[in-house]
Amino acid sequence: MIPEKPPSLLASFRFAVEGVWDVVRTQRNFRIHLGFTASVIVLGFWVGLSREQWSLLTLTIGRVLIAEMFNTAAETLVDLASPDYHPLAKRVKDLAAGAVLLSALIAVVVGLLLFGPPLALRLGIDL
């Protein structure tokens, strides 16, 4: 068997973009995360986050979105490999969903730490 020629760099990028578009188009939770992302970005401009704070926020947002994409990939692969119920298939799906949940909870903590003080200041709340 002759090995298949690897895709070009441009084709690889196109496949990656197709993967991102697929998750945006098909996954409600990913779209919810994008909605929160947009809101947090607007809030970040409003409170005037520093460059370092933007860096931390960007990494935090990225971690949540990436976790959601890995969750979708794991669920898709499990559905392919085990279309019928199996306790190990359930475990894999639960673990992947748990990773998203933990990532989102950590993002909330980061958000409170980043936005709490400047938001309180803008709203005239004494901490």
Image (cartoon, rainbow, N blue to C red):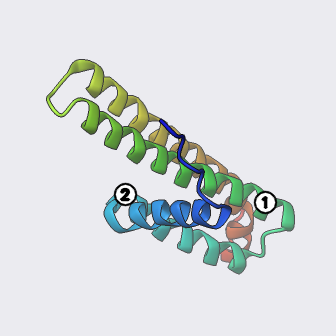
Q: Position of residue 3 (x, y in %)?
A: 54, 41
* First along the sequence among labels 1 and 2: 2
Q: Position of residue 93 (x, y in %)?
A: 33, 33
Mark 1 Cα shell of 10 Å, populated few (<14), some (14-19), many (≥20) = few
Q: Is residue 34 left or right of residue 48?
A: left
Asked if marks 1 and 2 touch (Cβ < 8 Å), the reply is: no
Identity, as a three-letter code, of the amino acid under mark 1: Ser
Distance (Cα) linking label 1 and label 2: 24 Å
The quadrant of the picture occupied by the C terminus is bottom right
Check the image and report above or below for 6 versus 81.
below
Q: Which residue bears the numbered disc 1?
A: 55
Mark carried by residue 29: 2
Q: Position of residue 122 (x, y in %)?
A: 71, 76
Question: As rendered, which of 23 and 14 lies closer to the eye?
Answer: 14
Residue displayed at 60% across by 51% down? 6
Check the image and report above or below for 124 versus 99.
below
Check the image and report above or below for 103 versus 10.
above
Q: Would residue 127 be seen by someone viewing this image from the given angle? A: no
